[in-house]
Image (cartoon, helix red, strand yellow):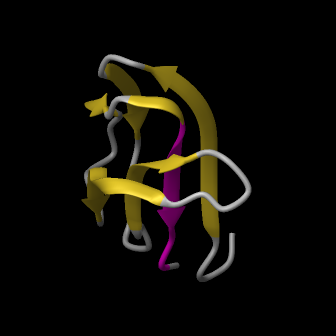
Amino acid sequence: RRQGDKARLLTEYRGLLPQCLTFWYHMYGTGVGTLRVYAQSSGIRPRKIGNDLFTQSGNKGDKWKVAHVTLPRAIRAQVCGYLAGMK
């Protein structure tokens, strides 16, 4: 790892009704940055839909934690998980 490294996970979903996304995360150490989960439209020019669905920053201890977020209704969209490290 290098200072300023970033990781991104992207997956598509379709739903006329709200859906739930469950995921586990581990943020331990002094160099942990911010984890953001948000929805964006699909296509050539994706754009963010609404506010962040989940945000955590900094050291959360040496343990795995679970998060549950409700995905917005969308005919076709993407869920993005984005982690920007500080160290």
* Residue 62: quarter of image: top left
User: Which is the main secondary structure of the residues drawn in magenta?
Assistant: strand
Instruction: Give the farthest residue toward the bottom.
Output: 3
Q: Is residue 16 above or below residue 12?
A: above
Start and end of the magenta stretch? 77-86
Q: Is residue 17 above or below residue 84?
A: above
Q: Is residue 33 visible?
A: yes
- Is residue 9 toward the left or the right of residue 71 in the image? right
**Residue 10, percent from left and from top:** 62, 43
Q: Residue at x 53, y 48 (%)?
A: 41
**Residue 30, percent from left and from top:** 37, 72
Q: Residue at x 36, y 23 (%)?
A: 22
* Residue 71: quarter of image: top left
**Residue 3, percent from left and from top:** 61, 82
Quadrant containing the N terminus is: bottom right
Q: Is residue 28 visible?
A: no
**Residue 44, percent from left and from top:** 73, 56
Please tell me which residue lies in front, 30 or 10. Answer: 10
Please tell me which residue lies in front, 87 or 73. Answer: 73
- Is residue 75 toward the left or the right of residue 56 in the image? right
**In magenta stretch: residue 15:** no
Count of picture labels: 0
- Is residue 23 toward the left or the right of residue 81 in the image? left
